[in-house]
Image: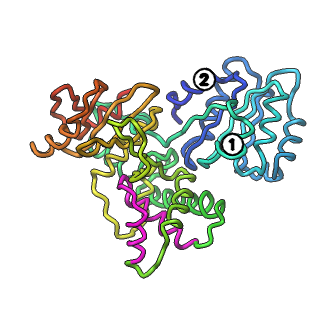
Amino acid sequence: MIIRELYLNRIRPFYDSDLIKVVVGIRRCGKSVLLKQIQAELRSRGVAQSQIIELNFEDLAFSFIKNEIDLYQYIQKQINHSKKSYLFFDEIQDVDGFEKAINSFRATLNCSIFLTGSNGKLLSGELATHLSGRYISFRLMPFSFQEMCEVKGLARDTLRDEDFFDFLNYGGMPQRFLMPSENETKVYLRDLYHSIVLKDIIQRSKAKDVDLLNRIVEYMVMTTSQTFSAQSIARYFESENRKVSTETIYGYLDLITTSLIMNKAVRYDVRGKRILTRQDKYYLTDLGLSKINQTGFKTDIGPLIETVVYNELVLRGFDVYVGKTTKGEIDFIAMEGENRSYYQVAYLLADETVVQREFGAYAGIADHYPKYVISMDKFDFSRDGIRHVNLIDFLLER
């Protein structure tokens, strides 16, 4: 087990705050382990084990807690009112009306509350209504390439291209590194994929056309980083003699992103400084999930690398957009407050035409924010104030 310091460093200032700490992330990305690491830090600071109350709602031991009343009554029996308590609720979205109980704990108990969930709408609806301005959220991603290297004990000077392509093929879901063989890794990822589709998408949405939803999930997973068009998906299904409305597609797409299996990057008009409402891109949260179904789709390496860079930027805490310029597109704009940086991503700058295309994407952008071109090349192509960065170096830097 590695210490996920990047996330702990963000959450640590709020350990004793009355703000509710909400951690969301795709199923099996390490949320439960992160809670354990927070608890270990609390104990190292002198917090007694009796002050820590943890409920994992995937554990059958807590299956009797069905709603907010059950949750409230259980905590009232467990808590020590003479000392500050630290309450940890793992995968809490399975408890009906949990928001009301959490709000009651926050308002009436001397406690610090931590929640996790594998549903992107954990922070919408009643939670946002009851707790507006009283929570802080953190997005947890699967292991980054840097964390994979830490797990495997790999240093920069001993890394091989094969190590990166292993990450590109099988992603960073933490438990996959415990698998003893490639075949067992595939079985694990296949089971995880079906668990996400079945429990986090189909069961929670009560979808009427399960086969159609499965097919749309499969299509989106296999076409990561492509510009989305409901019309093109409708035409794809029409070619297979199946009529699907764009409204249905958009509805199912919302279910897919809510499960956190994919993320949406909207377009941002660089010149007009505004968000555009069409031609979004969708990125798979973990590339290992794209390798488990033999569907006939073939994904070039370029979109896979683009997905890795997108996920790395999200992991670093940026709001990530696809840039729209007067002459074309910038792969990513990473924003943090008033600051921003631009990224172009390519597999290799194979010839001068590719170099001109990637560096030329910044033509017409007159601001002085940092601009990067990222590729697998080891030769430095930096020019005209635009920095070229080797992909591996980028993934290993902080």
Q: Is residue 45 left or right of residue 311?
A: right
Residue 217 painted magenta? yes
Cα–Cα span, label 1 and label 2? 18 Å
Q: Position of residue 388 (x, y in %)?
A: 22, 32
- The amino acid beneath tag 2 is Arg
- Identify the disc placed on residue 385: none
Residue of label 2: 12
Which residue corresponds to the image point at 76% horizontal and 53% vertical from the top-left? 60
What is the three-letter code of the residue carrying label 1?
Asp
Q: Earlier in the sequence, mark 1 or mark 2?
A: 2
Based on the displayed image, in which of its 4 quarters is residue 9 positioned? top right
Label 2 environment density (alpha carbons within 10 Å; few <14, some 14–19, many ≥20) = some
Q: Is residue 212 magenta?
A: yes
| Residue at the disc numbered 1 | 90
Check the image and name the residue furthest to the front.
272
The stretch of residues the image draws in magenta is: 210-238
Residue sitting at x 60%, y 34%: 137
Q: Is residue 368 visible?
A: yes
Q: Measuring from the top left, give residue 142's x and y in whole percent.
A: 49, 43
| On screen, residue 18 above or below 377 | above
- Return the x and y of residue 393 as percentages of the image width and height: 29, 32
Q: In front here: 162 or 89?
A: 89
Asked if 13 appears above or below 354 in the picture, the reply is above
Looking at the picture, how far across and down is residue 86, in whole percent? 75, 28
Relative placement, left or right, of 357 versus 365 is left
In the rendered view, would you say 352 is above or below 389? Answer: below
Name the one closer to the observer, 173 or 297.
297
The one of 279 and 261 positioned closer to us in this rendering: 279
In the drawing, does residue 253 fall left or right of residue 182?
right
